[in-house]
Image (cartoon, rainbow, N blue to C red):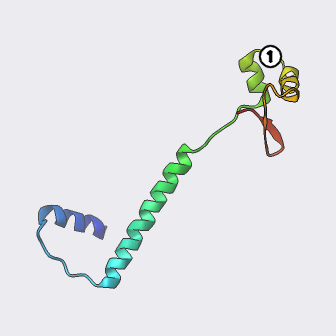
Amino acid sequence: MESKKLLALAKECPNVIISITVSDLIEANEALIRKTKAELEQLITGTNTETYPSPDQVAKILGVDKSTLWRWAKVKVSDPIEIGGKHRFG
């Protein structure tokens, strides 16, 4: 809440001089860094949800049977990725 008051003051009186202790300045900077870090982490986490289709989904997309996918994997036509003991296709 106080930061909103400071922002309003800065907009209304941009040339006003404010006296602040070094410890308060450090605390304010650390709070700003924490807030920015949390926002960036949220942004990265929200947009970095890469998913890989399951064998059933790939078979449906390609119009082939799952056994064809396994045969292709065996002869290295496609190379599935193993995630958590399950095969996924990249």
Image quadrant holding the N terminus, namely: bottom left
Query: Which residue sits at x=18%, y=65%?
Result: 10
The residue lying furthest to the top in this view is 63
Vertical position of residue 35 compared to residue 45: above or below? below
Give residue 81's position: percent from left, percent from top: 77, 38
Query: Which residue sits at x=79%, y=34%?
Result: 80
Give residue 17's position: percent from left, percent from top: 14, 76
- Name which quarter of the figure residue 13 lies in: bottom left
Give residue 27's position: percent from left, percent from top: 38, 77
Badge 1 element:
loop
Give residue 49's position: percent from left, percent from top: 60, 43
Vertical position of residue 20 compared to residue 80: above or below? below
Depth check, front residue: 80 or 3: 80
Query: Which residue sits at x=49%, y=50%?
Result: 43
Query: Mark 1: which amino acid?
Result: Val
Question: Is 13 on the left-hand or right-hand side of 70?
Answer: left
Q: Which residue is mark 1?
A: 64
- Name which quarter of the figure residue 77 lies in: top right
- Name which quarter of the figure residue 24 lies in: bottom left
Depth check, front residue: 73 or 25: 73
The residue lying furthest to the front in this view is 76
Q: Characterize the local packing of mark 1: few (<14), some (14-19) or many (20 or more) Cα atoms within 10 angstroms.
A: few
Total numbered labels placed on residues in the image = 1
Vertical position of residue 49 compared to residue 33: above or below? above
Question: Is 73 on the left-hand or right-hand side of 45?
Answer: right
Vertical position of residue 12 compared to residue 82: above or below? below
Question: Is 22 on the left-hand or right-hand side of 67?
Answer: left
Image quadrant holding the C terminus, namely: top right
